[in-house]
Image: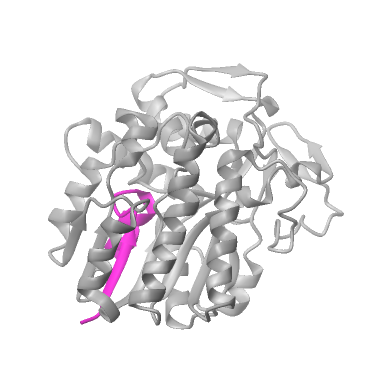
Amino acid sequence: MNIALVTGSAGLIGSESVAFLADKFDLVIGIDNNLRQYFFGADGSTEWNRTRISEAYSNYKHYPADIREVSQLEPIFKEFGTDIKMIVHTAAQPSHDWAAREPFTDFGVNAVGTLNMLEMTRLNCPEAVFIFTSTNKVYGDNPNYLPLVELETRWEIDENHPYFENGIDENHSIDHTKHSIFGASKVAADIMVQEYGRYFGMKTGTFRGGCLTGPNHSGAQLHGFLAYLMKCAITGNHYTIFGYKGKQVRDNIHSHDLVNMFWHFYQNPRPGEVYNAGGGRYANCSMLEAITLCEQISGKKLSYSYSDTNRIGDHIWYVSDLSKFKAHYPGWNWEYGLEETLTQIHDGIAARLAGTIA
């Protein structure tokens, strides 16, 4: 039997992975205990998404295990053993601000949980391909010291800088920088995944995501800015912009495009490799530009205000350079641009608010 195992399976990338892999494996195992609701309240709950994928995919099997507890993971790994061929580890505490409230919880989920998953893989299915969703926050605030130029609606990097054409590459330093507590816990996990590839020879791949987005995102104020922004546009809820004049830039990758990167890696893994993963120059926007797009797509004016206080360790300008991944896997490319992704997010949120699931 060929089995794929997905952690955080009711979240944005986890559920996209389940959908993508369901027809490629005999069984897809999902691990998710809806900690996102604990982190972000009702807005963050993924229960609706767990129900959706459980009903949509007959070969999906769900376990509400806590990745921080080996005692809860071990029975799953022992039951399926070497039949597990692919592991997509997306479970995380993903917020800068929340991490500072409970550093033990943040580190437990992001770092200890990842170590637990790596060890369970090494001991029970060492030939499985292990894919980890890291974050561009491992670079800390180093990107903020690049030569940035203020334009009318966004910050941009100086056109003479090497990063101007394609964005920030994997050689950008992750050291001597302020990461935020969240960023630091993800650094620990990121390095550990690399080490299991380099030291133990496991088939590990680390993907440092920009803004990961899509129609099945349970966006909340502290995480998932495009989904939450669109939700505010639809519902009339107030939105607060934190710092940088609203001109901070993010690249945005649709969840399907990211999982397709995982799939290409799975078919030809490069142990211990690291890739930046985002919308790159293909799909990026500032906060002000995103607000304009949300208003155009929803047909409603957004109620928002501005705070001069930026989030600690937050990026002013970040665009991912995917040149390395595209060189290694030339068959991959983006399928979803920014407007198409935001339209899907709008339609998904509208359907859920209307009492149906898109």
Q: Quadrant of the C terminus?
A: top left
The image position of residue 143, as x and y in percent, is 74, 46
- Residue 39 in magenta stretch: no
The residue furthest right is: 160
Magenta-highlighted residues: 1-20
Q: Quadrant of residue 234 in the image?
A: top left
Residue 46 visible in rendering: yes
Residue 2 forms part of the magenta stretch: yes
Quadrant of residue 120 within the rendered picture: bottom left
Q: Is residue 339 visible?
A: no
Quadrant including the N terminus: bottom left
Give residue 218's position: percent from left, percent from top. 35, 39
Q: Is residue 312 left or right of residue 355?
A: right
| Residue 224, percent from left and from top | 45, 39
> Depth check: 247 or 42 in front?
42
Left or right of 355, for residue 114: right
Question: In the visual, does 17 lie left or right of 105?
Answer: left
State how the image is colored.
one colour
